[in-house]
Amino acid sequence: MPVDPALAQLVARVGAFHITQRAMNRAQRSMEAALASGSVDNAVRAAYLHEVRRYFEGFDSEARAQLRDVDRQLERVNQIHFNFTAERGVAVKRIEAIGNVLDSLRALPETQP
């Protein structure tokens, strides 16, 4: 059976990952050998595609959960940043108002002539 270029591309793409799971690693090596020998039959192809799907869907779910968590943390950090910015604005206005009072106080003599 001739080698399917899309399958060969997928095998190369998957092969670029550092795979530590035994079943996926075994499926990858098996498919690479089948491609090299030109003996990719439907059973080998189906088994490989099943293993790739199983392996990468798990990572996909994990990565999406991590992204949701990071997004939640960023929202929290942004809210904290917003709150501190508002609090800083209030403090600056207080300092200005207090400075005006102190400037007026300094302008007045201690005793009246």
Image (cartoon, helix red, strand yellow):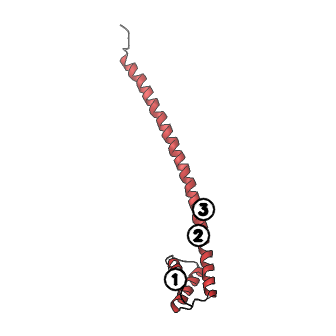
Task: Say which quarter of the image contains residue 2.
Answer: bottom right
- The crowd level at tag 1 (other Cα within 10 Å; few <14, some 14-19, many 20+) is few
Q: Total of numbered circles in the picture?
A: 3
Q: Is residue 4 left or right of residue 92?
A: right
Q: Nearer the viewer, residue 9 or 106?
A: 9
Q: Earlier in the sequence, mark 1 or mark 3?
A: 1
Amino acid type, label 3: Ala
Q: Nearer the viewer, residue 10 or 102?
A: 10
Tell me the element at label 3: helix
Q: Nearer the viewer, residue 5 or 15?
A: 5
Q: Is residue 101 left or right of residue 52?
A: left
Amino acid type, label 2: Phe
Looking at the figure, which quarter contains the C terminus? top left
Q: Residue at x 38, y 11 (%)?
A: 111
Which residue is the site of mark 1? 5
Q: Position of residue 1 (x, y in %)?
A: 57, 91
Q: Earlier in the sequence, mark 1 or mark 2?
A: 1
Which residue is the site of mark 3? 65
Which residue is the site of mark 2? 59
- The crowd level at tag 3 (other Cα within 10 Å; few <14, some 14-19, many 20+) is few
Q: Residue at x 38, y 9 (%)?
A: 112
Q: Earlier in the sequence, mark 3 or mark 2?
A: 2
Q: Where is 104 relative to 39, above or below?
A: above
Q: Where is 102 relative to 51, above or below?
A: above
Q: Tell me whether circle 1 and circle 3 mark residues in contact (CB < 8 Å).
A: no
Tell me the element at label 2: helix
